[in-house]
Image (spheres, rainbow, N blue to C red):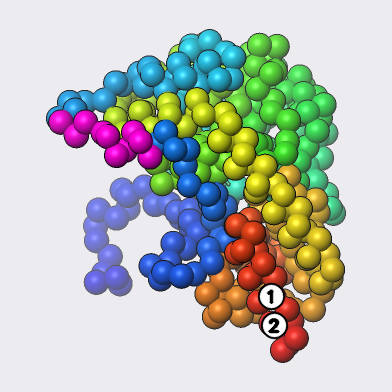
Amino acid sequence: MANTRFAWEDNIRKVVPYTPGEQPKKNNIIKLNTNENPYPPAPGVVDVIKNFDCDSLRKYPDPTVGNLVHAIAEVYDVKDEEVFVGVGSDDVLAMAFMTCFNSDKPILFPDITYSFYDVWAELLRIPYETQALDENFHIIPEDYMKENGGVIFPNPNAPTGVLMSLENIEKIIAANRDVVVIVDEAYIDFGGESARGLINKYDNLLVVQTFSKSRSMAGMRIGFILGNEKIIKYINDVKYSFNSYTMNRVAIESGVASVTDTGYFNECVNKVIKTREWTKERLKERGFIFEDSKSNFIFAKSDKISGEKLFEELKKRDIYVRHFSKPERINDYLRISIGTDAEMKKFVETLDCILENN
Ligand code: PMP
């Protein structure tokens, strides 16, 4: 069957899909491979789900996602018209690509970055050009100051965890007033300074965030964009031309409960940061090499064992981390998400055991 070639295949849109991190079916593993938060969502989210009025599911949800848009606008001190909400940041990023990257000139993003960007560009037939990170995995701002059809990068970058200063981000936005610049802040809450304060100064800026990491809601799928109301309107026009009801009722209600609980949010984020700093020290003691990370993961390589081998040895012992075989420059690195203190302690003990026997 796989080798049969059908006549209609020439007319198919063929794409090489993004490969998400593994979601093993096994219980009792230590899962440090997809940058999930090890702590539960806010207590209010649990209440919403426990008490949810299931009869309401007969009816379509609010296509404008009004309650959640409003709650996000209040928390981040912007107007409702400056917020777009979607099914995780993957969804809002895809909508932003479709809406904003509509030029014959190439969009620019780093060569080592979130590996969905080139997938969307290929899918949507957007020309793109990648810009190499410097030898320490830092973005070189000047590389984004040439003629282009748009700019996107994560801050902190993924999978490196490296943060760019707000000053450099502003330079990139200011040098690109004729295109849209998207700053993907999936990991910003773990120690970076958000660019969202710049949306009133720069009408060409979109800041994208997610509930998946700092708000422990990867399974609920909520992401949002903050930006000038004119671009948000354009993005909504595309959304309503594609699928009006992207956010389900449970997601809308539980999203409100999550975003309004600032105390719980700060508590969880601070716990992750503390554990990350502890883990950095333990990795340094063991000769690991890494750039400083301001995210909820560390991108590190051992001076004693290859990335692939260490990945396999950890997996054998039920510890899952992420290994990227391409590009070659990063194939000795592992991206290690930050778990609970107990999980990271077990991870370090397991590392010692592996390093002793190799
Ligand atoms: N941006 C970056 C940089 C990411 O690493 C991820 C997580 N895979 C996302 C966006 C998407 O996250 P989500 O769709 O869960 O919000």
Image quadrant in which the N terminus is located: bottom left
Callout 1, which amino acid? Glu
User: Is mark 1 in CB contact (under 8 Å) with mark 2?
Assistant: yes
Mark 2, residues whose alpha carbon is within 10 Å: few (<14), some, or many (≥20)?
few
Q: If the image is split into quadrants, where does the C terminus sit?
A: bottom right
Q: Quadrant of residue 107?
A: top right
Q: Position of residue 37 (x, y in %)?
A: 55, 49
Q: Position of residue 197 (x, y in %)?
A: 69, 18
Residue nearest the observer in this picture, 172 or 296: 296
Disc 2 element:
helix
Q: Residue at x 69, y 75 (%)?
A: 349
Magenta residues (range): 46-55
| Looking at the image, residue 9 lies above or below residue 41 | below
What residue does disc 1 label? 349
Residue drawn at point x = 66 percent, y = 11 percent? 200
Give the alpha-carbon distance from disc 1 to disc 2, as whole Å: 6 Å
Q: Amino acid at mark 2?
A: Cys
Quadrant for residue 59, please give it: top left
Q: Which residue is mark 2?
A: 353
Answer few, some or many: residues within 10 Å of disc 1's Cα (few below 14, many 20 plus, some between 14 and 19). Answer: few
Q: Specify whether residue 4 is painted magenta.
A: no
Magenta stretch encompasses residue 53:
yes
